[in-house]
Amino acid sequence: MKFFSKNMAIVVWKTIRYNLKIIFANRFVWFLLASFAFYLFFAIMNVYEGGTIGEDTIYNLLLFPGVLLIFYPTAFGIQNDEDSRILEILFGIPDYRYKVWLVRLVMIFVQVFVILIFYGWISSFLLYKVNPFEMAVQLMFPIVFLGAMAFMFSTIIKNGNGTAVVMVLIGVALLILSESMQRSQWNIFLNPFDIPNNFNEIIWEGITTRNRIFLGAGILVFLLYGLFNLQKRERFV
């Protein structure tokens, strides 16, 4: 029994490692270093400017590094499969591609979640006391939303560079709109820790809850549509 469990653990670990290599195309270390570099840069700038640091500051501080971590594997995943000649194999096995990509997306989200907890712990130690787990949970809503959107567009465009361009344009548009929708439940980048002055906390909590429901529904729609697009074998192979 122990031998069987050990073999299963080895197989699972090798499967995860193999899929992560394909997802990140052996570039994960560089994206991890880039996200950490951006985190340090923004953290140093906040300290240098001497502004008040709170949970809302930490949330904004970690948002961009999290988006950077999830951007590449979701936008370039289909192209990486094609470049490594894995795409033809996936489409050759009925319904297997759904399981593979669903597992890969879960691995990506879990990996980013763990890294955000680590960043939250560092922030709590160096900048301001926060709950790293709660912070990571709140950050995952907009991050996974954008990641699921990138995955959906990658199944439509089938090209990593094209998907990247579309996502950058959408991201810029969302950032511009977020200024006018700062207190709206439709704001993708709503900061739940940034309670507006003279704003009732109960009302703000309701807005935040509706915003998270909206993002959760969007994530589900993007993922289902992306997986549905994988049915169209002739568009990929």
Image: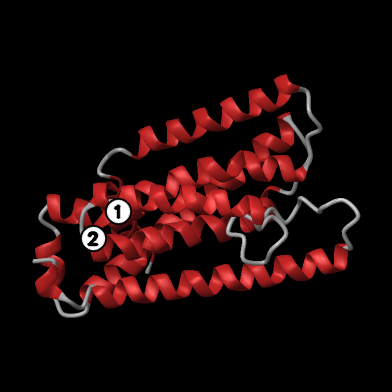
Q: Is residue 160 left or right of residue 38?
A: left
Can residue 3 be seen? no
Q: Is residue 218 left or right of residue 211?
A: left
Percent x, y for residue 106?
Answer: 42, 63
Q: Amino acid at mark 1?
A: Thr
Give the position of the N terminus as an image quadrant. bottom left
Residue to which mark 2 is pinned: 157
Q: How many marks?
A: 2
Percent x, y for residue 41?
Answer: 57, 25
Identify the residue at image location x=21%, y=79%. Answer: 95
Q: Residues within 10 Å of mark 2 (few under 14, many from 20)?
A: some
SS label for mark 1: helix
Residue to which mark 1 is pinned: 163
- Say whether marks 2 and 1 touch (CB < 8 Å): yes
Q: Residue lying farthest front?
A: 180
Percent x, y for residue 194?
Answer: 76, 50
Closer to the chain start, of discs 2 and 1, is 2
Q: Is residue 119 above or below residue 71?
A: above
| 3 or 232, nearer to the observer | 232
Identify the residue at image location x=53%, y=75%. Answer: 217
| 113 or 165, nearer to the observer | 165
Q: Is residue 121 left or right of residue 130?
A: left
Q: Residues within 10 Å of mark 1 (few under 14, many from 20)?
A: many
Identify the residue at image location x=67%, y=40%. Answer: 121
| 29 or 171, nearer to the observer | 171
Percent x, y for residue 101?
Answer: 30, 66
- Find residue 42 and report its image quarter: top right
